[in-house]
Image (spheres, rainbow, N blue to C red):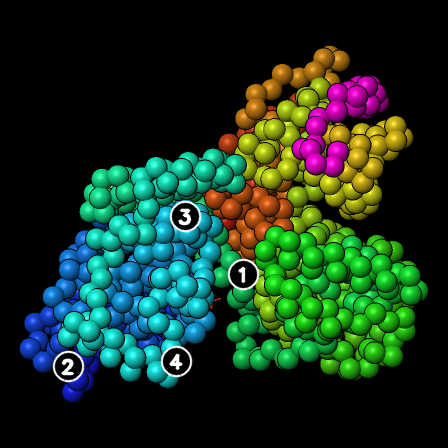
Amino acid sequence: MARAEVTLEVGDDGIAIISISNPPVNALALSIFVGLQRKFDEAARRNDVKAIVLTGKGGKFSGGFDINVFEKIHKNGNISALPNTSFDLILNTIEESEKPIVAAIEGLALGGGLEIALGCHARIAAPGAQLGLPELSLGIIPGGGGTQRFPRVIGVSKAVELMLSSKSIPSEEGKKLGLIDSVVFSKELLKESRTWALDIAEKRRPWIRSLHRMDRIGSLSEAREILKVAREQAKKTAPNMPQHQACLDVIEHGIVHGGYSGLLKEDKVFKDLVLSDTSKGLVHVFFAQRAASKVPNVTDIGLKPRHIKKVAIIGGGLMGSGIATALLLSNISVVIKEVNSEYVLKARKMIEANIQGLITKGKLTQDKAEKALTLLKGVLDYTEFKDVDVVIEAVIENITLKQTIFSEIEKVCPSHCILASNTSTLDLHVVGEKTRSQGRIVGAHFFSPAHVMPLLEIVRTEKTSPQVILDLMTVGKIIKKIPIVVGNCPGFAVNRTFFPYAQGAHLLVNLGVDVFRIDRVISNFGLPLGPFQLQDVTGYGVAIATSKVFANAFPDRTFKSPIIELLLKSGRNGKNNGKGYYIYEKGSRPKPDPKILPVLEESRQLTNIMPGGKPISVTDQEILEMILFPVVNEACRVLEEEVVVRASDLDIAAVFGMSFPSYRGGIVYWADAVGAKHIYSSLKKWSDKYGSFYKPSRFLEERATRGVLLSEPVSSSAASRARL
Ligand SMILES: C[C@H](O)CC(=O)SCCNC(=O)CCNC(=O)[C@H](O)C(C)(C)COP(=O)(O)OP(=O)(O)OC[C@H]1O[C@@H](n2cnc3c(N)ncnc32)[C@H](O)[C@@H]1OP(=O)(O)O
């Protein structure tokens, strides 16, 4: 592996080129900071150096501070491991240097990488470099002066927008905003940066120290107004996350008391936040997401992903159209097959509406949208299937229909073609039973709406070939999904783990707890919708179909709630017809509908599970735990059966498939923070009181008794048991 190092070369022109090298993204590891300090000191001392250019090797400036250091601090609590770069390196050495320093940026300058560049006296970038301060997405604020210099360079409004959203911008936009002084072709980057540095040294260009600037800040009252609006917005969009308000406070402090005072405050707040639970959860998710892309015997055996040019989708309903949209937007040709031309047209309309939605939200340009639609073809037969690389079947959950489709596509598609099903519940063995292509059969489980939800659950059987899995993972990444590879079992990893979520909520209602209180408790915890509003939105048909699957697969731990059947009987269809647990009216927020109370009463009478016929009395915390602990319990079974490669894959599944709050790190991470002992003893208590739905799994019992983390690998736990 290449060494992390900083090099210095001095040219005949008197320019010192200092280069960061730490592949793959030139993260600012502690040794890089030491190296930078040494090389800048050397350049400052040397008489043959007139000016300095700072750059990154391998086509990247820097991906920012080394996040592994945060992970270590989270484990050992030792904050003193953080170097004092904001003052020693960026302020005193770079910004206050007696020789001008120009940042030559290629590829990316993120987080600490951009903060170092902001300390330089000019920034030259190659086209398309990604520039941003994504620290808030890690639960912290920029800690290298970004909260002070960014607003001073690009203005308060844009700086706030970019920091709060953790979004990056390309060099070209950076140039328009004044962040970048010049955009030049990659091959000209060093030459142009050298010239620029010399020009500053010889006073042909201004020598600008960002922290001293006030020209882009505007008046104090304007800045305060921008910050006030941002605070209100952040209260809504990031309610349980401290870093958003903290970032705004630090920006304001610097505007009121000056940049240096702002740096001092930033340093303190940054260090406090590094130790916060929010940062621990988000950093865990960062690494868990990268870990999910490493699948033993698939990604580590030297296979190369094949190029996927054309995908066929069978079924242009909600799922099929969503999947098609995601593919088209990533320049993949899509053939969508339907049973008649009316349905083909409907599918096209849905895809157009998906795309229009993205344009309206500013996420897509008209040009790109038009180009994407040219790659779409609607068909009624298999003629177009002769050269497709992947088929994704997305018809209704009917096993006979799916079996027929699979035996047909096996005949018409080329022999390399991947045969995927978007089933969310059916056994893949049975789906592909009538074919001789078991190695090519795989699940491609997208989540609705498929063009928006980030997770792609790739389901393999023992026969699915590693090449097929690798190819599907690659397609997933191309279409900007987060793929996790899981085993074949009822509900696979995501729906299987989360089936007790809705059932737990229904059980509580039948024990007498208020529906809307449950939804409030769950959304206060951080899920975007409570379980009942989620059912309204996803449709009761889905709820009925999935509960049937789980009732068959796991009858010992299924709670059968009559509520949905009763709602349907009383003319309620959820959001679909504007009436569910909530009332849905155009232009207004969903309103709880008290008219459902008699329906709930009827359900309670039918199930008759309230102890002594009276509603149980529970705290909000108990409500939360009575819904989420059964999910953890099922996650334990999923882990024990090794349906997922590693525990953190379930965290990714929870965050990106079920919108579990990312700052809580995912379901298993959260459970470990709560403690297996408490979860086990609570479930045991409730199973004695309310029945087998709560019965703790063997895995949970064993881990709780032995004090082993739920996230510890199954095999290593067995090994540690053997050692005892
Ligand atoms: C003091 C400062 O204010 C604090 C900070 O700077 S905090 C850090 C701010 N920077 C960031 O948040 C950037 C995080 N990284 C990213 O967003 C993306 O990795 C990226 C856009 C740089 C590259 O994306 P991509 O090309 O898809 O590669 P990706 O798989 O994500 O990363 C490649 C490898 O680099 C590692 N990596 C990326 N950024 C890293 C970082 N800042 N520190 C340590 N490792 C990092 C990843 O973990 C991964 O390692 P692996 O191969 O062992 O799994």
Determine if the C-beta at disc 2 is less than 8 A from ligand 1: no
Residue 124 rendering spot, x and y as whole percentages: 33, 72
Residue 136 rendering spot, x and y as whole percentages: 41, 48
How far apart are the alpha carbons under marks 4 and 1?
33 Å
In front of the other: label 4 or label 1?
A: 4
* Residue denoted by label 2: 14
* Residue denoted by label 1: 292
Secondary structure at numbered mark 3: helix
Q: Which residues are magenta?
A: 585-606
Residue farthest to the right? 340
Q: Is residue 470 above or below residue 284?
A: below
In front of the other: label 2 or label 1?
A: 2
* Residue denoted by label 4: 186
Identify residue type, mark 4: Ser
Circles 4 and 3 in contact, beta carbons < 8 Å: no
Tell me the number on the disc at residue 157: 3
